[in-house]
Image (tube, rainbow, N blue to C red):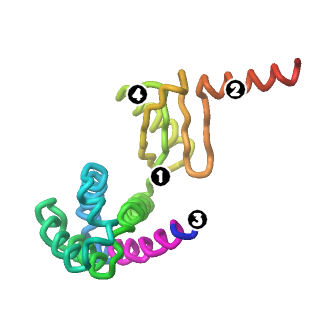
Amino acid sequence: MSEPASISSGIAARYAAAIFELAKDEGALPALENDVEALAAAYADSADLRELATSPVYSRDDQQKAILSLGPKMGLSPLTVNLLALMAANRRLFTLPQLVADIRARIAAEKGEITAEVTAAAPLSAEQTARLAATLKARAGKDVKLKTTVDESLIGGLVVKLGSSMIDTSVKARLAALQNAMKEVG
């Protein structure tokens, strides 16, 4: 990990730990989970929010006022709005993507869940998703939350990343292995 990314992750981890513990103590983890999903969606969809968080053109006060105005309109809990306002006052909004990822990981760990990143050649049906989740749950011994993406270059099959292991059943990987085997023969 590069040094700037490491610094951002460290900053975000401290804020994530603080809000997670406060929400846990108040019994507000479900609200925090909803807030995190709303923040992630807003950050992904809004170029203005990304610019507000990352641009040095906006002062601390501008960032803080914008967050205090936007938070309630987004339906964020007061705890989350206050954390974001504090981050704005400390010029730390640029760590928002890392904050969201860290809080998601903490909530998943608290719930006994792990996330599997699944890349498929075509969109998975609801039945396929349910079967895959059940298979991965049996393997991991924990509830598995699937994060699916589609990559048509796989031609067929799946690539599943679960924790530190990766299962690649894609046609693309099999063709590459066959190509390597043919190079060794010829």
Vertical position of residue 185 compared to residue 119: above or below: above
Of residues 120 and 66, the one nearer the viewer is: 66
Start and end of the magenta stretch?
5-20
* Residue type marked 2: Ala
Relative to 51, 133 lies left or right: right
- Residue where numbered disc 1 is placed: 114
Judge by depth and name the residue closer to the eye, 64 or 170: 64
> Which residue is painted at 52% across and 40% down in the image?
136
Q: Position of residue 165 (x, y in %)?
A: 62, 46
Q: Which mark is residue 74?
A: none
Q: Nearer the viewer, mark 4 or mark 3?
A: 3
The question of residue 6 being in magenta is answered with yes
What amino acid does circle 1 point to? Ile
x 48%, y 26%: residue:
152
The answer to whether the residue labelled 1 contacts the one labelled 4, judged by CB atoms less than 8 Å apart, is no
The x, y position of residue 157, in whole percent, is 54, 25
Q: Which badge, 3 or 2, is on the more N-terminal residue?
A: 3
